[in-house]
Amino acid sequence: MSIVTLQLGQCGNQIGFEVFDALFSDSHCPQRLCSKRENEAYQASCKERFFSEEENGVPIARAVLVDMEPKVINQTLLKAAQSGRWKYGQHSGFCQKQGSGNNWAYGYSVHGPRHEEPILNLIQKEAEKCDSLSGFFIIMSMAGGTGSGLGAFVTQNLQDQYSSSLKMNQIIWPYGTGEVIVQNYNSILTLSHLYRSSDALLVHENDAVHKICAKLMNIKHISFSDINQVLAHQLGSVFQPTYSAEGSFHYRRNPLGDLMENLVPHPEFKMLGVRNIPQMSENSLAYSTFTWAGLLKHLRQMLISNAKMEEGIDWQVRPPLSGLPTLGKTSLNKELHFNTSIANLLILRGKDVHSADLGKQKLRAYIHQYTKFGIEEEDFLDSFTLLEQVVASYRNL
Amino acid sequence: MLTKQRGPGGPAPSRYGNEETPVHVHGFLTEKLSLNLDKSVTTSATCGSSVTYGTSAPSESAVGEPGGCEGRRGLPRSLGWPPCSMTQSVVVQGKLRVEGGTPLARSQAASFATNVRSVSFLSLFLSLIAVGQCGNQIGCCFWDLALREHAAVNQKGIYDEAISSFFRNVDTRVVGDGGSISKGKICSLKARAVLIDMEEGVVNEILQGPLRDVFDTKQLITDISGSGNNWAVGHRVFGNLYQEQILEKLRKSAEHCDCLQCFFIIHSMGGGTGSGLGTFLLKVLEDEFPEVYRLVTSVYPSGEDDVITSPYNSILAMKELNEHADCVLPIDNQSLFDIISKIDLMVNSGKLGTTIKPKSLVTSSAGASKKRQEKPFDAMNNIVANLLLNLTSSARFEGSLNMDLNEISMNLVPFPQLHYLVSSLTPLYTLADVNIPPRRLDQMFSDAFSKHHQLIQADPKHNLYLACALMVRGNVQISDLRRNIERLKPSLQFVSWNQEGWKTSLCSVPPVGHSYSLLALANNTCVKPTFVELRERFMRLYKKKAHLHHYLQIEGMEESCFTEAVSSLSALIQEYNQLDATKSMPVEDLPRLSIAV
């Protein structure tokens, strides 16, 4: 079953490219870690999920790229084409000339309705190309205007049009000390809207990934492409085919469905996080050895202590919820775990975001930029309320 | 679709194309192509053959790597043409020739060529309006720098998206309006500018200088008599006289744009034309193009200003700026002069390794040898020109964290009236001819906040920040940015409700000849002293009613205009005062919404 990926905004497109690249390299990796037949089955399964076939053998990613300004999409298309190994469909990109100006309201109320039709048409075309559609994977950031605003709008529309398909939104939580000044507003509005229309929210924080890059991967000058590659690595390991009950050559057919089934038992609790080990630079990989048991144990420790990486674990133990480890390829391990740690994330970061927001709101700072495009104060209030409810329900767990 | 036309008595067109096949392609191109207006279209395929439309042999290195085809249809890699996405159609006429590579490769290349699909050319357009003597002199420096920057970045002379934001590509052989061409080699660049001055001296000088071909005569509005340093003459008299003409020229220049994003207005506040007519223009723009941002670069009068009535002109203009501008970047001559002196000091102190750069970005003259012959304000005007270039760099060039112009207003203007942004450009040596070995990157960030590097007399470090934007160009990564923000944050005071009020952007293209640069824009209460001083100078004159009659004799001007203007300024100062008062208050912990669970 296939997944259609939707890349929104600069962040979404840059990450999306890295994700497809990682998926492709992983499935075509030359290392012979398992038997050939297994490898082929794995490759086939991965390909079917994310790429569709082109006549002359270059796989086309099942993706729709959307952005309101042309530079990033052009770059992404070009990079993919230049790699020669895979590419994006010729018409799978949609862009406009003028960006959203970091304004959620602009993305949601202006760009959304205006470009609803062409975007949804593109999605429909991709969806029709799939033999069987597992669902949608939407990559967006929360701080900007296009990713957040337009993303919220599109997710809502997908909810209406494809109500039987699952949607997982990959959202990027911005750096604490701002990338964008109004990111708190944008984040609150996005989260509240997504909570209503999405099936699962997979959260990644720029801060955390940055730390991973710095501490574990030993990168001196971390650039966004480094961060995106780590993210892609994590996402790849979530979505790569996993064994099914039938045996080693059969892979589970429904990636999104499986994930949702196991991880989102109640529609109230939708937020997911990823813990990934091992994460290290390629150089050190050659010098390390792993055992499966060791990895699992480490992972469990990470979960229990709510750490995002292997080092610096803070040993205040909280009662863990049961998670379901899914098996993957031997060199990778990941665990997608729904537990109180996400709730804590929401609570802690939520607190910062809320207090920052409430402060701003009290003085009506920046509000005029949003009311220009039809978002009124009541909308803000609604968003606050919804999120408070979510936080409260997580707390009660 | 590719329709092959049979030339009279020519060889039968082959399916794979041969030397003499004339082609008329009307369609859309997706992959990168480079278009040469000599009617040859070149694209290269990685499968080792090249497709040329045209009469000339493929001269540019448009050929892909030979071999390595592997029977796969590789995607064409092309040179010189920026990647594209959709919508505009292109009509190419010429001949198709496929050569090189294996027959299979050739057929594939040809079939690719016949499947040209879509090219797009979406870009943002920015339009510069220079009003008055000061405005036009700065504008002239700006266009000179812009041309040089694009020449350095765009080696192949192809009209690309980045250039298109500031220039039109025009075929000068065509008379009249139809000459605009949107693709291909640069024929003749015309600036997207409108030059307005009420006396002819400055504009004439520009038109006789090296930049004369960059401006269209249709883009100029001039008069003879000048405004006599009188805001009322500029605003009321010339405003009414030229309103229609101005509107028409603006509409024309907007028509040439696919999508106009921003108007840049450059003027001075102390004079008559720049200040009066310039601010009249703001109102016109707001009515005619309400969705387009109006970014104003205003040169404020310094302490020792030679125009006696400059306080009157400035205050009257301020009222208009308060009401009709989206964003104002105040600048004053004294600060620019100080910066130039500092640069001179750096050069002349004989530091090791300082050499005069061959490519100069400061003076419009070709090199250091002519340095002494430059006009007195040239170096200072170039700083302002650099400011505008860096401001728009992230919108024109690619980067890992882009920032468009509408994001500036969105992030830095929390309340509509407080839209005055203090700017600083570092490192200083990027503004100079000199080649000083780059200091540590971190020094660049520290300097951006010091009061000696601001383009207006202001001290942001000791005042309250409402918001701050850092626009970095060149080889700087996100970790460097983060590290410096963390480092500098403790020494800066941010308003309590915007403690993390940072906006950042990274553009990969550095300024010409340097590896990186930083532009910092701050919405900070440190602009207040400038305004307070302006008001004081105004009051000194106004109390004695000195020179007032020159203004009052203009139809429509009354004393109430003055009192309104001054009270609008006082209200603004009051807002800043209120914010300053919150400086030392502790951060309140606001109660969260309580919900029934």
Image (tube, rainbow, N blue to C red):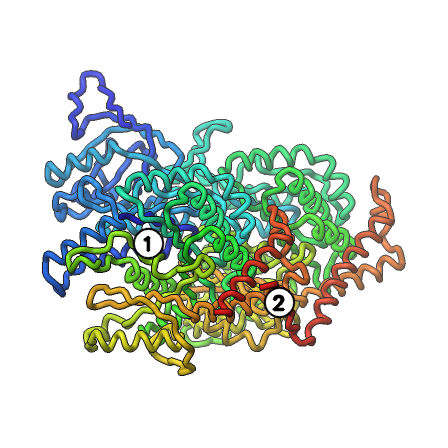
Q: Quick one: A191 or B148, which is closer to the camera? A: A191
CB under 8 Å between discs 1 and 2:
no
Q: Quick one: A149 or B386, which is closer to the camera? A: A149
Query: Where does residue B283 sit, x and y in percent of width and height?
Result: 69, 43
A195 sits left or right of A277 in the view:
right
Query: Where does residue B91 sit, x and y in percent of width and height?
Result: 35, 29
Outermost right residue: B544
B558 is higher (above) or lower (below) than A272: above
A309 is higher (above) or lower (below) than B515: below
Query: Where does residue B134 sit, x and y in percent of width and height?
Result: 64, 52
Residue type at tag 2: Arg
Residue B428 visible in the snapshot: no
Label 1 belongs to which residue? A256
- Disc 1 secondary structure class: helix
Label 2 belongs to which residue? B592
Q: Quick one: B158 or A22, which is closer to the camera? A: A22
Q: Quick one: A42 or B102, which is closer to the camera? A: A42
